[in-house]
Each structure stands twice: as C-alpha cells, then as structure tokens.
Amino acid sequence: MKLWAWATLVAALAFAAAPILSRGFNGFEPGQFPVPQDDPPVQPAGYAFAIWGLIYLWLAAGAAFGALRRSDDPDWAAMRPPLVASLLIGAFWLPVAQASVPLATVMIWAMLIAAIIAVFRAGDTDRWWQIAPVAVYAGWLTAASCVSIGLVLAGWGIMPGTPAALVALVLALAIAVTVQYRLHRAPEYGITVIWALVAVIVANASPFNAAVVGLSVIGIGAILAIRGTDTE
C-alpha cells in the first residue's frame, strides 16, 4: 500500500508538471483537422479550461496527503492503481494532443475509464482529500473525452458540426447521468460536468445554436434531478 501511495504522488506531480513542460492547452487548433474546426459548437468556452488548474493542484494535494498521512490506510488502497494509470497517461497527453488529435482522443478515453474506476473505488474517509479531487478530475474528463469525439466527427467530415456536437453531448450525458446516479456520494463529479455544459451554452449563445444549447440545458436539469433524489 505504501508503494502505491507514493506512486500516486509521483504520478500526480508528473501530471501537474505537464503543462509547465509544454505550452498550455485551451482546445485543439483549427488546423489540426482535415476540415478546420473554427469555433466548433461542441467545444466549451475558453474560460472553462481554467478548471485544469484546480484539478492539477487538488490531485497533487490529495496524493501528498495520502502518501504522508494515509500510506497504509486500506480505505485509500483500491483507488490508487487506476488513478496512477490515468495520471501517467495524462502526463504525456498534452504533447500528444498538440501533434495528433486521434491519438489524443484514444488517450483521453483511457484516462477517463481509469479515472471513473478510481472514483468508484475511492473510500469514504478524508472526503476532501480522497474522493473529491478524483471526482472533479473524472467529471472534466467525461466532458473532454466526448468533446474530442465531436471534434473528430466534424473535423474528419463524418458529419457537420452541430450533429457532431449533439452526438458528443448525448454520449457525455449518458455517461454522466449513469455515473452520478450510481455515485451519489461524489456530487463534485456532476458539478464538474455542469461546469462544462454551462461553458458549452456560453460558447453557443452567439450565434445562438438552439439544438446544442437546448440539449445542454436538458443535461444540466438531468444531473440536478439526480442530485435531488439523494437522501444521503
């Protein structure tokens, strides 16, 4: 358990160092696609990407607390291996995203799957150090991975921008609603998905895209409705 505790800290620090070692990321560049994606409807407004700062710091702080104070606590043990896997992939994601959209899409889905496993395995103790940062991380990855799908669909000419955005949103909401329904103890997950959906609404407010905005609003309502059924 102690080895995994320190491995988690190393992985979290490597993940947090990635944006320092490479230029920042506020979405894929239009020219990275065969069909340039200028202001794609699936992509959230730029301000939403600031959440990465919170994610990096909170994951590193939680991992440090876990290594220093809970290295041999069995309540922390189960979530560490999948979290390490997700973070190590994430440490290499930024340079890949700047070079290859398809490969970055595969990687971010691997990060998402591992992160969701980690958040389900997280224990109930030390809530703000253990499950909360992982839940925020998994919530943002849910949005980001589906945005990548929408960009690939539109950027490779498989479908126009708005239909691609709707496919991505349906996929994101299916994942988010399922996870939040089964994981009431981690509201931070749903809140983070809502953060992304609000940013999608902002990005599609002018010019107004009724289909994308409408589906985003429905998604926000669905996540809030699930939280409303929480009796814990």
Image (tube, helix red, strand yellow):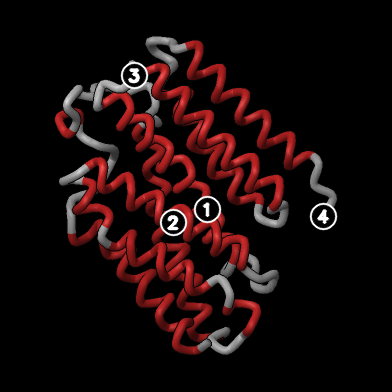
The structure residue drawn at horizontal position 59% and vertical position 23%, both measured from the top left corner, is 217
| Residue 189 point in image, percent of width and height | 58, 49
Q: Amino acid at mark 1?
A: Val
Number of other residues with Cα within 10 Å of mark 4, as a class: few under 14, some 14 to 19, many 20 or more: few
| Residue located 20% across and 34% down the image | 29
Q: What percent of the width, then of the height, locates residue 112?
A: 45, 53
Tag of residue 232:
4
Q: CA distance from mark 4 to mark 3?
A: 43 Å
- How far from the left and from the top, in percent, is residue 8? 43, 75
Instruction: Pick whichever of labels 3 and 1 is earlier in the sequence.
Output: 1
Q: Are marks 4 and 2 in contact (CB under 8 Å)?
A: no
Q: Which mark is residue 55?
A: 2
- Residue 136: assigned label: 1
* Residue linked to disc 3: 159
Please rate how many residues cluster around mark 3, counting C-alpha atoms within 10 Å: few if below 14, some from 14 to 19, many from 20.
Answer: some
Q: Secondary structure at mark 1?
A: helix
Q: Is residue 229 above or below residue 93?
A: above
**Looking at numbered disc 2 in the image, what kind of residue is underneath it?**
Ile
How packed mark 2 is, by other alpha carbons closer than 10 Å (few <14, some 14-19, many 20 or more), is many
Find residue 120 and report its image quarter.
bottom right
Q: Earlier in the sequence, mark 3 or mark 2?
A: 2
C-alpha distance separating marks 4 and 2: 26 Å
81 vs 57, nearest the viewer: 81
Residue closest to the far front = 158
